[in-house]
Every structure is written in C-alpha cells, then in structure tokens.
C-alpha cells in the first residue's frame, strides 16, 4: 500500500489527477487482495509453534518452548558475554589476555536445542518469517547495547553465497530489529573475498580463514555501531568485521547475536590466579596452562 501511494504521488504531475486516482484505487485493491489471501491462508494453515506444533494466535514459539530455550545466566564476561564461574571475575581468560576490536558482545542464548533449530530454520530452511521472532530475542539481549549506538549494521555475504541462498540472514535480523528499535540498518561492510565455510574449523583456523575478508563500504560520520549476526562462535567473524568498521570511521563497535556457542570443554581452574576460566579449546596445543596463566596475570 505504501509503495502504491508513493508511486501515485511521484507520477501525479505526469499522469494527471485521473490517472493518479486510478493508481491509488489499484493500490487499495491490491492491498485488499493480499489481506483476503492472508486470511484464507490463515484458515487453511493456522499459526502454530515452529518447535512443537501447538496452535498459536501469534508469534512462532509457544510459551513452553520459549521457556526451554537455552539462555546464559550471570555471571558472564563483561567484554564478550561468555559465562564465567566467579561473580568477582569481570573478564574471561581470552578477553583478559588479548585485545578485541569490538567493545562488547552479547547474545540471547546458546546455540543448542530449540534456539539452534530456529536459527537453522531461518538460515538453511528458508523460513524468513522467523527473522521477526529472532529479532525480538535480539531486542531483549541488546537492552544494554541499543541505547549506546547510532546505527545497526550486519555481517555481509559474498555475492555468490547470496545468490545461492537468496538472502542474508544477518541482514534480515538487522532489518527486523531496526523496526523494533527504530534504528534502520545501514550497509557498512562488504565481503571482499570468498572464504571457506567456518563450520568444522578450529578457533585458530577460523581467525586465519576470515582475516582480511571484509572491508568498509565507505567512510562514515557515525561513531557507534551495532553489528548483527546469527551466531557468535569464536568471535573471529565479529572481530574481523569490527576491524573493518573501525577502518571505515566508527569509533565504537558492539556485537549482538541471537546465539553463541556453548563452551565445548570443562573449565580449568588455576589456583591463585585471577583468571578462573580457562577454555582449553581456545589454547594452542602444548600450552603450559599454569605458566601461561601466571604470566598473563
């Protein structure tokens, strides 16, 4: 309807009042047709929970399935949002021992169970309507980040990958979140080279694979941006995108994802160290855990 009205106004000077009125009438008829079609589809295929199939009046996830979505509980790392075991520990070991280009990262939940199923439905199943549901989760997870930022942006895809999939799930999430937060997303990044699929790569391989893959779309006068993606695994993609955003003129970059990976191995506590959470999967083979922790402290 909005598009039809915009076309009518833009053509009024050329087509005249009669043609403009006809265009507006056509727009109203088209909108009515869409409403009727939507109503018929609603009768034939009533809304239901994507995860368990129970009938719903609105939304895509029933209250019971929503309560079972895997969510992180505090305390968590002040920088990347990873779970930490001790309330007095502000940073996980990785954030305490290395700099990041991004200022802070947050996620709604863990990439497991129903939340992983929803993300896979959007990303691989082509269920684009799920972007609206997942954007509501982003709005919750981003309550401390959204007031800080001036613009939303998203992780871009290469053109071949975009043609293959037909859409960019990160862009869809940013668009839906933008509607909820009244912050229209901007295309601030471009993927300048094809990369290997990150799935199955180790932490070091992920950082190497994604290095140099993104560049700023252009220079910006915006200072604080929020990068949107579906999943945070090792932080490699977020880190490389943040580097490119800073190169493009942003002064602060925050990261918001629907999910993050769970720690894949138990935590290792180092007696007497302020780093209480060593993720063994993130350490290089042969690392002397005790000596490394003491030196890092």
Image (cartoon, rainbow, N blue to C red):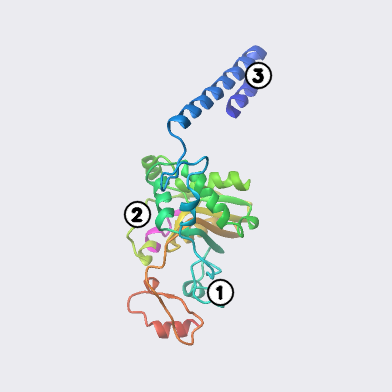
- The numbered mark, 3 or 1, whose residue comes first in the sequence reads 3
The magenta-colored residue range is: 207-214
Q: Where does residue 58 sit, x and y in percent of width and height? A: 52, 41
Q: CA distance from mark 2 to mark 3?
A: 50 Å
Q: Where does residue 216 sit, x and y in percent of width and height? A: 52, 52
- Residue, x 64% and y 58% (percent of image)? 148
Label 2: element kind: loop
Q: Relative to residue 177, is residue 260 drawn left or right?
A: left
Q: Say if 2 sits above or below 230 in the image.
A: above
Q: Where does residue 142 sit, x and y in percent of width and height? A: 58, 56
Q: Which mark is residue 12?
A: 3
Disc 1 vs disc 2: which is toward the camera? 1
- Residue, x 43% and y 47% (percent of image)? 157
- The numbered mark, 2 or 3, whose residue comes first in the sequence reads 3
Q: Where does residue 107 sit, x and y in percent of width and height? A: 51, 59
Q: Is residue 158 visible?
A: no
Label 3: element kind: helix
- Residue, x 62% and y 25% (percent of image)? 5
Assign the N terminus to one quadrant of the image: top right
Q: Quadrant of residue 50?
A: top left
Q: Is residue 210 magenta?
A: yes
Which residue carries the number 1 mark?
90
Which residue carries the number 2 mark?
197
Q: Looking at the image, which is closer to me, 71 or 53?
A: 53
Q: Looking at the image, which is closer to me, 185 or 116?
A: 116
Q: Is residue 62 visible?
A: yes
Label 1: element kind: loop
Disc 3 vs disc 1: which is toward the camera? 1
- The furthest residue to the bottom: 272
- The numbered mark, 1 or 2, whose residue comes first in the sequence reads 1
């Amino acid at each position: 309807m909005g598009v039809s009205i915009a076309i009518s106004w833009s053509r009024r000077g050329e087509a005249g009042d009669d043609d403009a009125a006809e265009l507006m009438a056509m727009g109203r008829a088209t909108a009515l047709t869409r409403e009727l079609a939507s109503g018929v589809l609603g009768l034939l295929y009533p809304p239901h929970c994507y995860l368990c199939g129970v009938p719903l009046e609105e939304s895509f996830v029933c209250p019971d399935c929503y309560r079972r979505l895997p969510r992180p509980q505090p305390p968590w790392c002040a920088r990347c949002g990873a779970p930490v075991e001790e309330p007095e520990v502000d940073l996980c070991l990785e954030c305490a021992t290395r700099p990041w280009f991004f200022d802070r990262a947050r996620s709604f939940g863990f990439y497991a169970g129903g939340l992983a199923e929803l993300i896979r439905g959007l990303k691989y199943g082509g269920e684009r309507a799920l972007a609206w549901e997942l954007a509501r989760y982003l709005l919750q997870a981003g309550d401390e980040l959204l007031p800080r930022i001036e613009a939303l942006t998203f992780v871009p895809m290469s053109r071949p990958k975009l043609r293959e999939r037909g859409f960019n799930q990160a862009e869809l999430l940013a668009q839906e979140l933008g509607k909820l937060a009244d912050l229209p997303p901007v295309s601030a990044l471009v993927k300048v080279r094809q990369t290997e699929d990150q799935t199955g790569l180790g932490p070091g391989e992920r950082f190497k694979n994604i290095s140099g893959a993104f560049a700023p779309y252009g220079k910006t006068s915006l200072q604080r941006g929020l990068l949107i993606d579906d999943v945070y695994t090792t932080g490699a993609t977020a880190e490389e995108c943040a580097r490119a955003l800073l190169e493009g003129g942003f002064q602060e970059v925050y990261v918001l994802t629907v999910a993050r990976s769970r720690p894949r191995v138990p935590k290792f506590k180092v007696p007497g160290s302020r780093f209480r959470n060593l993720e063994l999967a993130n350490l290089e083979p042969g690392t002397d855990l005790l000596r490394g922790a003491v030196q890092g402290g």
